[in-house]
Amino acid sequence: AAPIALISGMSRASRNGIIVKTGTTIEKLALAKSAAFDKTGTITNGQLTVDQVVPMIDIEPSELCRLAASAEQASAHILARSLLQVVPAAQLLEIISLKEMTGAGVTAQLASGQTVQVGKFEFVAPDQAKQSQTQTTVYIGIDGRYAGYITFIDHLRQEAPQTMSTLHQLGLQRLMMLTGDQATTAKEIAAQVGIDEVHAGCLPADKIRLINNVTPEQRPIIMVGDGVNDAPSLASADVGIAMGAHGATAASESADVVILKDDLSRVSGAITIARDTMRVAR
Ligand code: ADP
Ligand code: MG
């Protein structure tokens, strides 16, 4: 299309809180056939609140929470930040040594003498059979022993189900969820929002591989995410869209489109604007 038409599309998008960085993105958005979504902070609002604290050994829930929050005090992960909201800073125990594993969790040696692990079940208790939680959950190990778990409430963005049905109406063939979270939680959220293809337990490299595996007939593919760990998959999609209102800078930098309003429906809005622009341009 003529550059002038693409520029007018970009300016219409920006008036709607949708920053499109290049004109060719308008052309790809108009033709999009698939879309992939991160879960936490993208399909859900990412404002996690602690729900239940469940010890599996002889320990007070408040003490389990204190140890977990202490181990997480240096982590930027959304689960770590949410956990730290329920423990007063003055109660945190000092960390002597710390190791954070991307997509798995943290191991911290505390000044109190304990070694505390917080993260996904496979990370904390690799040799045990997992109980399935439908809520987002962190599991806790103390001195190499599985010690309990903490569940979180993570609300769907209210506009998410409508956004998915609009994308179907716009003719997108394939909608998927790519998440590092556990399968039980991912499937529950996907069902509520109307996505039937779910890939859980994804490391950043898995998300990239899944996007790269999308066939030419199913392209262009859009990837929508908000976190630091979404930056590589946003860059590998044909169109990367960052939810920028509270999202990570790294995600916004890797994206082709940044949505400034905290509103997922701008994703389908961006496609509609792009199609209108291309119709006028031809
Ligand atoms: P996503 O943001 O897609 O859920 P991540 O790759 O950040 O994925 O993490 C995958 C999973 O690993 C999380 O759902 C969580 O269970 C666990 N995890 C990673 N880092 C931490 C952390 N600092 N504290 C607790 N759990 C973590
Ligand atoms: Mg996220």
Image: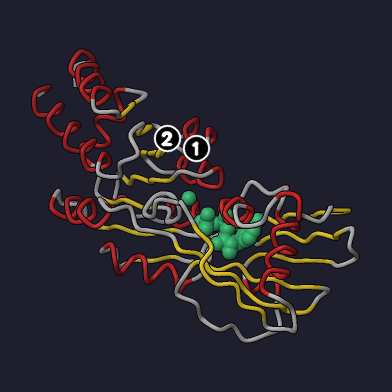
| Spot occupied by residue 2 in the image (x, y as percentages of width and height) | 19, 16
Of residues 83 and 240, the one nearer the viewer is 83
Of residues 199 and 106, the one nearer the viewer is 106
Say which quarter of the image contains residue 121. Answer: bottom right
Instruction: Give the answer, above or below, for where 17 lies relative to 178.
Output: above
> Do the residues under discs 1 and 2 have CB atoms within 8 angstroms?
yes
What's the mark number on residue 251? 1
Q: Residue at x 32, y 52 (%)?
A: 157
Nearer the observer, disc 1 or disc 2? 2
**Marks 1 and 2, Cα distance to the nearest angstrom?**
8 Å
Instruction: Indicate which disc, 1 or 2, sits on the residue closer to the N terminus.
Output: 2
**In what quadrant does ligand 1 lie?**
bottom right
Q: Residue at x 29, y 23 (%)?
A: 23
Specify whether 96 is left or right of 146: right
Specify whether 9 is left or right of 183: left
Most distant residue in the bottom direction = 129
Specify whether 70 is left or right of 18: right
| Spot occupied by residue 164 in the image (x, y as percentages of width and height) | 23, 55
What's the mark number on residue 260? none
